[in-house]
């Protein structure tokens, strides 16, 4: 499976990405409320985690990633933001309690996961009843940026998989010309 190469950190935050996927505006497209707890799985440098902490003013944001080095960068970028926390995670085990999360946010990660059923089963474990899952990933087609098309997963494949785990599909969210967004509820 394709995994992000930490040597390519500049891909996580640059002018082109900020223009095509501005973090705060992108999060607002999912209609995240100002209360609750959001977990950003595969948070990287905190590209979405930090803006989420500004939207969820009456709650907390947890950024998790499997790479310690990248979490150190995220912590530094977050500075003294009080409602944000970064934690080292395993791919199929998120370091939070059962039923403790209102929003699971996953951007450009699903295509990197080998056992997607196990991944989404873990997401389901951490979600509160009536919690949401927000997914952004690359369209499954050849394009200049992103992983090769054969390493991507289509929005239809994601939807079919997640719905078989008893998530309810709510809507498709328009992200940009290269990515799709999907919103589910448990």
Image: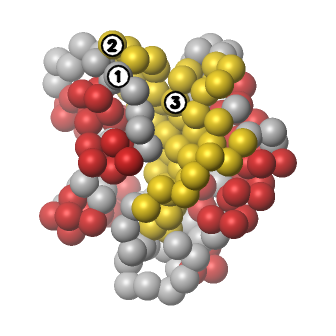
Side of 68 relative to 23 (left or right): right
Against 103, residue 172 (above or below) is below
**Residue at the location (21% across, 68% down)?**
16
Residue receiving disc 1: 34
Along the line of sight, the residue nearer the viewer: 103 or 61: 103
Q: CA distance from mark 1 to mark 2?
A: 6 Å
**Residue at the location (20% across, 64% down)?**
19
| Labelled pair 1, 2 in contact (Cβ < 8 Å) | yes
**Residue at the location (54% across, 83% down)?**
141
For label 2, the crowd category at 10 Å Cα-Cα, with few meaning under 14, some 14 to 19 and many 20 or more, is few
Side of 184 relative to 172 (left or right): right
Q: Nearer the viewer, mark 3 or mark 1?
A: 1
Side of 41 relative to 93 (left or right): left
Question: Which quadrant of the figure has residue 84?
Answer: top left
Work out whether mark 2 precedes mark 3 in sequence or the reverse, and give the earlier one: 2
As drawn, the label of residue 58 is 2
Label 1 sits on a secondary structure element that is loop
Residue receiving disc 3: 103
**Residue at the location (81% across, 39% down)?**
166
Q: CA distance from mark 3 to mark 1?
A: 11 Å
For label 1, the crowd category at 10 Å Cα-Cα, with few meaning under 14, some 14 to 19 and many 20 or more, is some
Side of 140 relative to 14 (left or right): right
């Amino acid at each position: 499976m394709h995994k992000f190469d930490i040597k390519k950190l500049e891909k996580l935050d640059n002018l082109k990405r900020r223009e095509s996927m501005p973090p705060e505006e992108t999060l607002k497209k999912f209609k995240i409320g100002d209360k609750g707890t959001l977990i950003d799985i595969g948070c990287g440098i905190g590209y979405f985690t930090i803006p989420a902490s500004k939207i969820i003013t009456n709650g907390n944001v947890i950024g998790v990633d499997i790479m310690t080095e990248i979490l150190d960068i995220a912590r530094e970028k977050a500075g003294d933001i009080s409602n944000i926390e970064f934690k080292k995670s395993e791919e199929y085990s998120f370091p939070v309690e059962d039923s403790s999360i209102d929003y699971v946010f996953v951007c450009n990660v699903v295509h990197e996961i080998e056992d997607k059923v196990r991944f989404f089963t873990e997401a389901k474990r951490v979600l509160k009843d009536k919690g949401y899952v927000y997914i952004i990933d690359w369209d499954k087609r050849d394009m200049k940026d992103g992983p090769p098309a054969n390493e991507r997963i289509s929005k239809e494949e994601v939807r079919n998989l997640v719905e078989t785990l008893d998530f309810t599909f709510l809507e498709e969210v328009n992200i940009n010309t290269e990515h799709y967004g999907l919103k589910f509820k448990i």
